[in-house]
Image (tube, coloured by chain):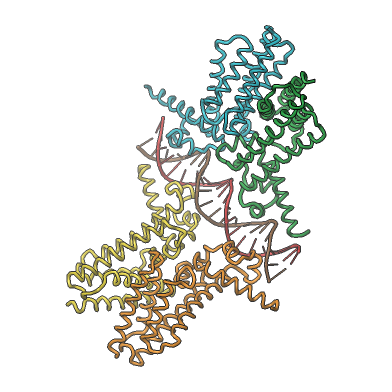
Chain colours: A orange, B yellow, C cyan, D green, E brown, F red
Amino acid sequence: MANNARGAETRRRIVEQAAPVFNQRGYAGTSLSDLMAATGLEKGGIYNHFGSKEALALEAFDHNTGVVGDLIRRALRDVHDAPGRLHAVVDVYRSFVRRPPFPGGCPLLNTTVEADDTQPALLERARAVMGDLRDGTVGRIVAKGVERGELRAGLDPDTVATAAVAAIEGAIMLCRLEGSSSPMERTASFLHQWIDWMAEVAR
Amino acid sequence: MANNARGAETRRRIVEQAAPVFNQRGYAGTSLSDLMAATGLEKGGIYNHFGSKEALALEAFDHNTGVVGDLIRRALRDVHDAPGRLHAVVDVYRSFVRRPPFPGGCPLLNTTVEADDTQPALLERARAVMGDLRDGTVGRIVAKGVERGELRAGLDPDTVATAAVAAIEGAIMLCRLEGSSSPMERTASFLHQWIDWMAEVAR
Amino acid sequence: MANNARGAETRRRIVEQAAPVFNQRGYAGTSLSDLMAATGLEKGGIYNHFGSKEALALEAFDHNTGVVGDLIRRALRDVHDAPGRLHAVVDVYRSFVRRPPFPGGCPLLNTTVEADDTQPALLERARAVMGDLRDGTVGRIVAKGVERGELRAGLDPDTVATAAVAAIEGAIMLCRLEGSSSPMERTASFLHQWIDWMAEVAR
Amino acid sequence: MANNARGAETRRRIVEQAAPVFNQRGYAGTSLSDLMAATGLEKGGIYNHFGSKEALALEAFDHNTGVVGDLIRRALRDVHDAPGRLHAVVDVYRSFVRRPPFPGGCPLLNTTVEADDTQPALLERARAVMGDLRDGTVGRIVAKGVERGELRAGLDPDTVATAAVAAIEGAIMLCRLEGSSSPMERTASFLHQWIDWMAEVAR
DNA sequence: ACCGACGGGACCGCCCGTTGTT
DNA sequence: AACAACGGGCGGTCCCGTCGGT
């Protein structure tokens, strides 16, 4: 393997191994010692690839949200009707709580709560990802569903998407608080019923 | 003023002035320097009343949750039908976002996200307060409402309460992320419609 | 009891209760919190009677050495021959290790080791007490013993007293190091034999 | 110079420069500021080599006792008869007081007096070194001497070794207390006479 | 590319002593 | 005479980032 490739490989490995640590302990709560332990590298080895802890944290955040985004994209690949797509999104998050792809819960939630003021760059990225999820994904599904008559007419996509995403994020928070996945089970059950209700009259 | 009274007064003042700081910056993110700046006291003066940063943080947390709890109790004082009480709870949180009684958002949300593992005492308190809110307040309202025929029969109080609280907490998080109160407005609007739907058939 | 007497009583109690604490933890190692715990008084109550921690430490030191001095004086009261008096002094220290009148070992040893440079006032007092013990007590017994023909002629009182005191202090140190009184038993046994040897030829 | 070698060299230098400071002021009495002043390094530089003050103190203790141990081993190298070896040990300590290899007196004495309870690790090491000196060195010399007929029959090696070590440690303490080396001179003179007495009959 | 030494600073906890009030 | 509030400071620990070296 070429020298360049080896460097890039190391860099990738650092991000992958740092990402779950950042998600669990937060930006400030993660020390370089933690990152050294997680990566097996010394400080110099990390700073060769990233100019600062923050730069690494940003990439780690992108990595984490990318993992979740991939899960959603994959779940939506073969479902084309709006109700089904909404059910699929809910189920991604339900399985997210039951079998987390990485520890520490939702990176958007964590970043929002921790980075209030202190980490504008992270917050900006979180805003963008959340906008993509709420408006670009859920909102768009609802809008198209109404357009196609798959969902009850008169629904406001913004409201539906916001409430749905809020319920999901809140459920993740409740699960962490109680150390149980049952809040997500209940919330998902409610969301599924709601989706069915929205689809009901349209049929 | 008596010496005893002066001490108690100072102690109360410390809690009051520290509480919003803890809520904004989190337990670890709040330094004693921050608390010194907020209270106008030196380290020794603070340490005289609280044996540790954690002890003060616990009281600050109680203070913050107490403020919210008081708002809810006051809002429920003169409303006795289940739908009205649910609307009232939602409105408390809507006004909570529009005119926050203290900065930094919901202390339960913040504590849950930050204190995952590192602050078991805070987490335990948050669990208790959340249990009181979800089961003792919202869940009980729903259960009684169904019992009295004010709410649609067959509703599961646990599911309704969990989904409602999740949506509210998630909305608070979205508001912080976007720096706007519109996610809460949308979510509240959805919750009000839902409450009306639950009350509809009962009438 | 008069008011003055009550104050003096409290002052005496403070010294008595502080003395063992100082002897165990040393001057610097004893905090005002320790003294508050030992006396049951608040800081102000202590500072009313003593202008500083050092002032109290000095009196505590005097108290401790006074206790030992009393033991020696009492042991010497009814013994008038030099060998007997030397045996008696050794036995005071042997019983000192077996049934300590206060914890922490010999205050002279402790003060010497800790107060090297940092506490000149304590050191000065320790010097005086040690001079009294070595020259005024042991040295004088030897000198009179030789004078009276009770001890072998030609003995140098200074050398005998110094070596005897050194062995005793060293034995106390060994007992603390090993957590056992056997070093003192062995050293006392040796000293008794030595005393007998010094008295032997004189008879 | 190699980087590895530079670090090891610095580490060695820290121990060497910290050792006398610890011996003079004690473990608790030595602050990191003292160590910074002694080594010329910043806190970070010291902390890089030692995980805690205690870790450094332990190595400093080992260094100090090692220096004394080397002096004793060297003094015993070319002396093979028991009386000569005992004289040699006494003379090491006599010269130890007259021309100290490091300030602060005997590390065993200092550690014993200060570390009573508070520093179990240091105390354990001191116990081991003292056991080696008293039993492994002095006691063994006496035992062999009796065995070979170089020393008076019937002597108990334990008692002799204990009394001798006690006298030496006590003499060191007296020298520090008086700020003079004459207590050690007198004690050594006594010990030399005693050794001669033990060897006398054997000849 | 990776290591490891080091600086300089901030953290919380605890210290001792003073001051004002019963 | 005794208490309790408070100031100001030092304690050890650990932090992040830089830089000289292999």
F1 and B78: which is toward the camera: B78
For the image shown, how many numbered marks are present on the structure? 0
Looking at this view, name the residue that lies furthest to the right.
D78
Where is A49 relative to D36, above or below? Answer: below
| Horizontal arrangement in the rendering, residue C53 relative to residue D148 (left or right) | left
A24 and B67: which is toward the camera: A24
Q: What residue is rendered at 55% in x and 35% in y?
A: C25
| Horizontal arrangement in the rendering, residue F12 relative to residue A166 (left or right) | right
- Percent of width and height locating residue A16: 56, 72
- Percent of width and height locating residue A32: 59, 63
Task: Check the picture and name the quadrant holding the C terminus of chain A.
Answer: bottom left
Q: Is residue B87 visible?
A: no
- Percent of width and height locating residue B48: 44, 46
Looking at this view, name the residue that lies furthest to the bottom.
A148
D50 and D18: which is toward the camera: D50
Task: Check the picture and name the quadrant holding the N terminus of chain A.
Answer: bottom right
Find residue B156 and report its image quarter: bottom left
| Horizontal arrangement in the rendering, residue C203 relative to residue B128 (left or right) | right
Q: What residue is rendered at 55% in x and 10% in y?
A: C78
Q: What residue is rendered at 57% in x and 63% in y?
A: A34
Q: Is residue C28 visible?
A: yes
| Horizontal arrangement in the rendering, residue A106 relative to residue B139 (left or right) | right
Where is B117 relative to A15, above or below? Answer: above
- Percent of width and height locating residue E6: 69, 56
